[in-house]
Every structure is written in C-alpha cells, then in structure tokens.
C-alpha cells in the first residue's frame, strides 16, 4: 500500500505524515527518509508538532534499499518532491515486500508545474490525500504555492518568500507581474 499526502506549501502534508507515524505502535519496524537537500530540520518536522522524527537522509529512491531490514514493514518519506530515481522501487517494495509506504511532497512548484518525481509517485499511489492551505491574501482555500520576488534558482529549500494562494489571487498576482 502506498499513501501520498500532497498539496501546496503550508497545507499540513508533513503534519499528516507525522500523525500517521505517531499513531503507529511498533516503531522498530519503521524506516523514515528525507532528502539530503532539505537542510531545514534534522529529521522530519512539522510546525504542528514539537517532536520531530529521526530520518535517514537520501538523494535517490534506490538509496532506500541499503537501509531495508528483514522486519521493515513501514516506510515514511518526507519531501519526496526533492528526490530522484525510479518510483518502481517504491511500487516493488509495496507489492513484493508487503511494505506500507507513506509519502508527502509538493505536487507543484511555485510556477505551477509538476514537481520532480511527484507525478510518478501519485501514479503509483493507492491512496492520495490532497491537502489545502489558506490563501495568504484572502483566506479562501488555497491550492497553489507562489514565490514572491525573483528566485535565484529553480529549487529554493525553505519557507522564505513562499505564500499560498487561491486561484483568484494567483490570477491577480500573475496579472500584476505581467505589467
């Protein structure tokens, strides 16, 4: 089984991932991963919880295979949008090894393009939970991440400069920037 939590920034994806983790009893059968590029926190961390969860830092999905143990029954992956690799690895772990996998990651970039390997992860997911945020401008439900200002690289890790927007406010911001 593969369950993916996705949506824009500030929508509670990691909080949902951690809620699932904290509700599980047998932690010795769980492995947690996060991308090395995400240096904001040591482990998996959400603003909703004071406690974080230790995570193994990886760059590529194939790195997960090095850490598997005989008793591994559950895998958690935070910020999967930053990872590289073939998602077939996850599918095979779920089907062939009977491992439950919980993943979270941004579905789109701040330019509203599919983010990294997330489209492929969504394609192999048995369950998808799309979280919404609240628009920074009007407080309506927000589905989009937007970057205020000029980005100096395609991927900028962190929260600084990012806001959540609803469709209406996103359209207004685009119109404003086109002028």
Image (cartoon, rainbow, N blue to C red):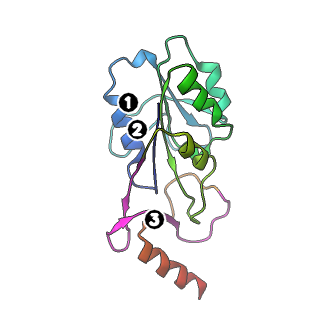
Which mark is nearer the camera, 3 or 2?
Answer: 2
Q: Residue under circle 2?
A: 17
Dot label at residue 163: 3
The Cα–Cα distance between marks 2 and 1, rounded to whole angstroms, is 6 Å
Instruction: Tell me where residue 30 sits by quadrant.
Output: top left
Q: Image height check: is 142 above or below 176? A: above
Q: Residue at x 50, y 23 (%)?
A: 99
Instruction: Tell me where residue 59 sits by quadrant.
Output: top right
Q: Residue under circle 1?
A: 21
Q: Image height check: is 30 above or below 171? A: above
By secondary structure, the bulk of the magenta-drawn segment is best described as loop
Residue 78 shown left or right of residue 12 in the figure: right
* Mark before the other along the chain sequence, 3 or 2: 2
Asked if the magenta segment contains residue 139, the reply would be: yes
The Cα–Cα distance between marks 3 and 2, rounded to whole angstroms, is 21 Å
Percent position (x, y) of residue 13? 42, 46
Magenta region: 129-154
Label 2 residue SS: helix
């Amino acid at each position: 089984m593969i369950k993916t939590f996705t949506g824009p920034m500030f929508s509670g994806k990691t909080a949902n991932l951690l809620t699932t983790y904290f509700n599980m009893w047998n932690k010795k059968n769980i492995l947690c991963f996060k991308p090395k590029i995400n240096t904001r926190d040591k482990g998996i961390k959400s603003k909703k919880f004071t406690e974080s969860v230790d995570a193994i830092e990886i760059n590529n999905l194939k790195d997960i295979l090095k850490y598997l143990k005989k008793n591994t029954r559950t895998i958690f992956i935070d910020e999967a949008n930053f990872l590289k690799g073939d998602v077939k690895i996850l599918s095979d772990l779920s089907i062939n090894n009977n491992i439950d996998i919980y993943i979270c990651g941004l579905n789109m970039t701040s330019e509203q393009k599919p983010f990294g390997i997330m489209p492929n992860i969504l394609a192999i997911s048995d369950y998808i939970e799309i979280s919404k945020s609240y628009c920074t401008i009007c407080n309506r439900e927000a589905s989009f991440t937007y970057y205020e200002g000029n980005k100096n690289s395609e991927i900028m890790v962190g929260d600084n400069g990012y806001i959540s927007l609803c469709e209406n406010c996103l359209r207004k911001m685009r119109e404003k920037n086109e002028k």
